[in-house]
Amino acid sequence: MALTAVVRIPTRALLRPWARLRDSALGWMEPVGGVEVSTQRFGSQRVLVEPASAAGVAVMTFKNPPVNSLSLELLTELVINLEKLENDKTFRGVVLTSDCPGIFSAGLDLTEICGRNPAHYAEYWKAVQEMWLRLYLSNLMLVAAINGACPAGGCLMSLTCDYRVMADNPKYAIGLNETLLGIVAPFWFKDTLVNTIGHRASERALQLGLLFPPTEALQVGMVDRLVPEDQVQSTALSVLAQWMAIPDHARQLTKNMMRKPTADGLLKKRDEDIQNFVSFISRDSIQKSLQMYLAKLRQKKG
Ligand SMILES: CCCCCCCCCCCC/C=C/CC(=O)SCCNC(=O)CCNC(=O)[C@H](O)C(C)(C)COP(=O)(O)OP(=O)(O)OC[C@H]1O[C@@H](n2cnc3c(N)ncnc32)[C@H](O)[C@@H]1OP(=O)(O)O
């Protein structure tokens, strides 16, 4: 018989100013304080959530083709689906993965930060902050199943997870490559990296905008395990099974103890960080760099 559960979605989640949700994209949402959904398979247009065969585990798959860039819509859907999983106490762990062949995520959607107006930049950056805060402080065990390229914001998203499994394919790379685009990784991107690979390795990686192929990513500690491409998700699930053996309350308190000071760094100056982002990204020189980078990406095919 199909397993179903009732998931309550707090109405406040629908009222956040950045959450300009499109009803068509989120068919399961109703702004009346809660909605019943089946845990068989749910999600939204760009984020699919499926319970895994192991109890208490879900797989969250990003499907924003062609490259899973983190558009405002994808970020919004991600946060809402995460909140939905957190509110459903039957779930304890989630595997994050991609539906785009060869690409985990291309990072921030460059069309959101190029050629738009300051109000849009502010709204978008708030959504990026929210994605990071929610994932980084999630009580759930999160494992990234990195089945493709993972630059910049894609790397950041995977670094918020508790464990990273990456496909052992030398065509893929992972890292915070912002400087290659002529932009600067914000302090909380930097802090997340430092907490993962240490200060010296981060200093070098960030200045040079290094994108590490899998073997180097494993060496530097940016990912925890490499496996053949067809075993990324199954390995992520078996890692979760090991983590599930730990009592939740002890693990959650420990995670919070480790991560809260870093998250507080942003929480204390969220508005200032938005203002910094808007003024930085609105500079003519930065917009020119981004336009050139986008043009190069688009020309690559031609
Ligand atoms: C001193 C002051 C301090 C103040 C501090 C202020 C703080 C402000 C700092 C601002 C920080 C902002 C942080 C940004 C982080 C980011 O995430 S930026 C995004 C970086 N991403 C990348 O560099 C990845 C770019 N993409 C690729 O390398 C490749 O596309 C790929 C490896 C992911 C996939 O390659 P392939 O399969 O060959 O596909 P493509 O043909 O390249 O792409 C297909 C299609 O998608 C478009 N595209 C690719 N990436 C993006 C993207 N990130 N956003 C939007 N669109 C993207 C690409 O242009 C192609 O489009 P067309 O089909 O040609 O139209």
Image (tube, grey):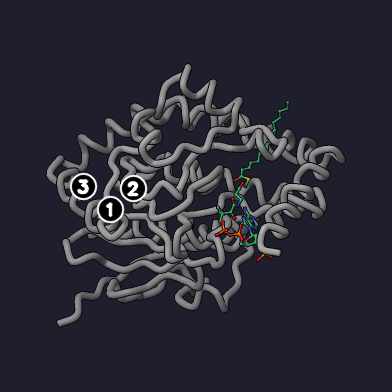
Residue drawn at (17%, 47%) of the image: 244
Identified by mark 2, the residue type is: Asp
Q: Position of residue 251 (x, y in %)?
A: 23, 36
Count residues near mark 3 (Cα–Cα under 10 Å), then give few for <14, some for 14-19, many for 20+: some
Is residue 133 visible from the viewing direction of this image? no
Residue drawn at (46%, 22%) of the image: 201
Determine which of the numbered discs, if any, sits on residue 239 in the image.
3
Disc 3: residue Cβ within 8 A of ligand 1's nearest atom: no
Which of the pair 146/254 is nearer the observer? 146
Identified by mark 1, the residue type is: Pro
Mark 1 sits on what residue? 228
Which of the pair 80/97 is nearer the observer? 97
Determine which of the numbered discs, if any, sits on residue 168 in the image.
2
Q: Earlier in the sequence, mark 3 or mark 2?
A: 2
Residue drawn at (49%, 41%) of the image: 156
Residue drawn at (29%, 71%) of the image: 39
